[in-house]
Each structure stands twice: as C-alpha cells, then as structure tokens.
Image: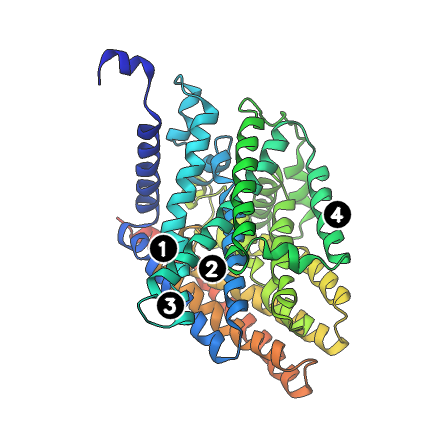
Amino acid sequence: MSGASARQGPTTWQLFAVLFREEWRLHTRLFGGWRFALFPAVIATLAVGATIALRETGTADGTIVTGLHVLALGFGLYSGTAGFAGSDMLENVFGKLSLVLSTPATLPLSRRRLLGLFLLKDALFYAVAFVLPMAASNAVLVGLSARTPVAVGALWLSLSLSFVAGMVLTVALIALRTRGVPAWALVGTIVFSAGSLWAMGGTRAAWTVFVPITGSVASAGGLVLGTVLIGAASLTLYDPTYGRPARTAGDRFAQLSDGLSLEAATSALVSKTLLDLARSSGGVWKPFVSAGILLALVGLVETITGIAPAPGIFFGGVLGLTAFTTYNWLTQFDSLEAYLIYPVSIADVFRAKRIAFVLVGAPTVAVPYLGAVYWFEATLLDAVVGAILLAGYALYYYGLTVYIAGFDPNEFLFDAVRFTLFTVGVAVALVPTLVAGFVVVPPSTTVALALVFSGFGFGGIGFVLSSRAGPRWDERYRNRD
C-alpha cells in the first residue's frame, strides 16, 4: 500500500473483507472449527425433516413456508443487536476483546460507516450460513426436478429479505434509544400497534408483508425499499457517542443474601447471580422480554394455520423453552474460572444456578402463561394440564441445557453436535405434546392424564440431569488439558 493510500485509510471493500474474516474466525475458534462448519448441514437436515413430517400430518405447504419466515424474521430481530455490542454485550459474553468493530475508538474510522458494513456483513454471513440451509426445505415442497434449484433459490431470497427486515427493525429501535427515546415509549408503541391490528382483523394481512414469496412483486419490492430506507435512516439517526448513564447501587448483596433462607455459601452464590442479572443491560426484564417474544411468535400459530390448539397444552409445552433463554441470561456474565478463588466446589455453583433459575424462571413463565390461558379461554382441565407441562418441561429443558452446555449455553447454538443433541432432546418431549394439543381440543381425560405423567416424568429427568451437571462438568474441567 502506498503512503497516500495508507493516509486515506482502508477502502470500504478492505474493511468489509476484514469483518468477514473476523466473523468466521470468531465462530470457528469459539465454537469449534468442524462443529461450526457442519452447523448449516444440521439446519438443512432439520428443515427438510420437519417439512416432510409436517406434510405427512396434513399441514399445508403455505403454512410451512410462513412458519419458515417466522423463524427467519425472529432470528433477524435477534441478530440486529450484534452490531451494537460495542458497549458491553460482547464483553459480557467473551470478556475483554479487541474487535474490528471497536477500532473507531482508537483509529480514525467512521463509526457509522463501520457499523453499516458490520450489519451488511452479518446479513450476508447469516443469509448463507443459516438462512440458505432453511430454504432447502423447498426441495420437499416442489419435488426434485430441473426447477428445484430455482425454487430453493427463490425461497432463500424471500427468507433472507424477512431476516434482513427483522435486523433493520431492531437497528431502528436501538437507534431511537440512542436519541433519548425511552424504552417504555417504544414498547408501548409496538404493543399499541399490534393490538390495533389485531382489533381491526388486519394481523394476517400485516404478517403477509414479511412473506414476500407468497405476495406480489410490488409488495416484495415495497418490503425491499422500506428495509433499505429504514436501515439508512437508522444509521443516520444512530448516535455513536451514546452511552448508558452511570448508575450507583447500595449494598444490596447483603440484603438479598440475608433474605434467602439458604446455607451461607449457597445464599451468597445465588445472590451474586441475581445481582449480576439485575445490574446488567436490561436487568431482570430480559427474561420477561424473551418470554414475551416467544409468546407472540407462538400466538401467530392460529393466525397462520387457522387451527386453534388447546391453549393450556400448547402454551405450556412451548413456553417451557424459555428455560434456555433464562439460563442463558443467568450465565452470560459468568465463567467457571471466576469461582476458583472462592472456597466452593463447581457442584455448589451449579446448584446455586438452579436455585436462581427457579427464582427467576418461575415468574417469567407464569405471567405470560396465565395471560395466555385467560385470553384464549382455556378450559379448567386444559389450563391445569398445561401448567404441569410448563413446570415439568421447563425443568427438563433446563436440565438438558445445563448438562450438555454447562456454563456456555450459547455455545451449542453454533456447535453442530451439541445443537443436534439439544434439538433431539427437546423434540422427544415437545412434538408429541404439540400433536396432542392440536388434535384433541379440548383434551380428553385420557390425553390429559398421559400429558400429566409426561410433565412429571420429564421434570424428573430434568432434575436428575441438572443434579448430574455439576459433577460432570467438575470432572471435565479438572481433566481438560
């Protein structure tokens, strides 16, 4: 590079290439090289297998396609937060790191320019690594022929557009926050808009906007144009100098630790976990937001399929999945190494995490579940069975997560082997439950009893797995190189 070009700084293409290489190295080094490389194959296998199973049960092709777009949009909403990790998100997860995204703090680079390239890189990277394998399911819907690659490509473009639209929506909300718009105003606007659409019966019409492949060319073009305009406006509006106001806190550790009726060591560990969550970005509301998003997504099922499942069984089975996100929030700021300086065992730490999980997870799932069974007018039997399923399955999903992933639940989201094990474990419990929830409405006494036994049985398995997690990871930690 000449002296003149060096003074001008790196070109846009050079920055983009460096960001892309960093993304690949970060994933392969954190989550295992070949295990991460195999992850797209796992997604493709799951997508194709689920499509075949849904068609065999009589699910319409349009419903399957819409469901894929729900997943793509939801993943986009989550992925949109990654570009704003420069504050404390990545540091909370990975510790002190020096990433390319952080270089504007020390080098003469435009924060907005680098952020725009980062988001573009994310859109392309995940569109290829995650969305494209999902589109392989269209080979099942159209059959194997000369036009199959074209059909898969068309669904990929449609899913990618939904994914990017989700990213842009999140970016827009974060940009508004940096301009001082309070969170309650943003949440209130979203809830009011969603409620107004539902009251006017326009939920289905509004949702079809995010399924470009089933609409007209004009509607797809409108989504593209809207996504580009909102994305550009968000980057312009985003304030790169924004920082969270400094906060002070009293000695809440002693108060909380004294208030827990536990042994001194266990009480201290539980208190630390709860305070770490409360003092992090978003605080204790993060698990509730995760549950609310999941509730909103599963609430679209009747709108999309036109079939009303048994509310208690359906929401009880699915809301239990928040066990993963709740545990993720509880361990996101922790590592086992951090506890080596304390006179406690790894088994003690895992036991404290389980207590903290119950304290945080119980209200996280109870509030949306009660709201769901009331709103959808569940029968008493259905509501009771669903509550048992919710408690049992949440404990099972928690035990499965902590046994497989230990203190790193995020890790198996990009680890082909662990993700497959987790998916199979979830499917064993959830799939039969959902089938029963859709087929027998309201549930018969026989079905209700079978599901009650399932809830208690899987709950017991979860308790055993969570109890064995401490000794298992203690042994693995001590025997590692």
Q: In the image, 134: left or right of 268?
A: left
- The nearer-to-camera label among 2 and 3 is 3
Residue situated in front as seen by the camera: 74 or 102: 74
Three-letter amino acid code at the position of disc 3: Ala
Three-letter amino acid code at the position of disc 1: Asp
Give whichever of discs 1 and 2 has the lower sequence position. 2
Q: Would you name the residue on which mark 2 appears? A: 401
Three-letter amino acid code at the position of disc 2: Thr
Give whichever of discs 2 and 3 has the lower sequence position. 3
- Give me the disc on residue 273: none
SS class of the residue under badge 3? helix
Q: CA distance from mark 3 to mark 1?
A: 25 Å
- The colour scheme is rainbow
Residue 153 is situated, as x and y percent measured from the top left of the image, at: 38, 57
Give whichever of discs 4 and 1 has the lower sequence position. 4
Q: Would you name the residue on which mark 1 appears? A: 415
Rendered image quadrant of residue 142: bottom left
- The nearer-to-camera label among 4 and 2 is 4
Q: Are marks 1 and 2 in contact (CB under 8 Å)?
A: no
| Residue 168 shows in this picture | no
Give whichever of discs 3 and 4 has the lower sequence position. 3
Label 3 neighbour load within 10 Å: few <14, some 14-19, many 20+:
some
Q: In the image, 240: left or right of 25?
A: right
- The nearer-to-camera label among 1 and 2 is 1
Q: CA distance from mark 1 to mark 2?
A: 13 Å
Furthest residue toward left: 1
SS class of the residue under badge 1? loop
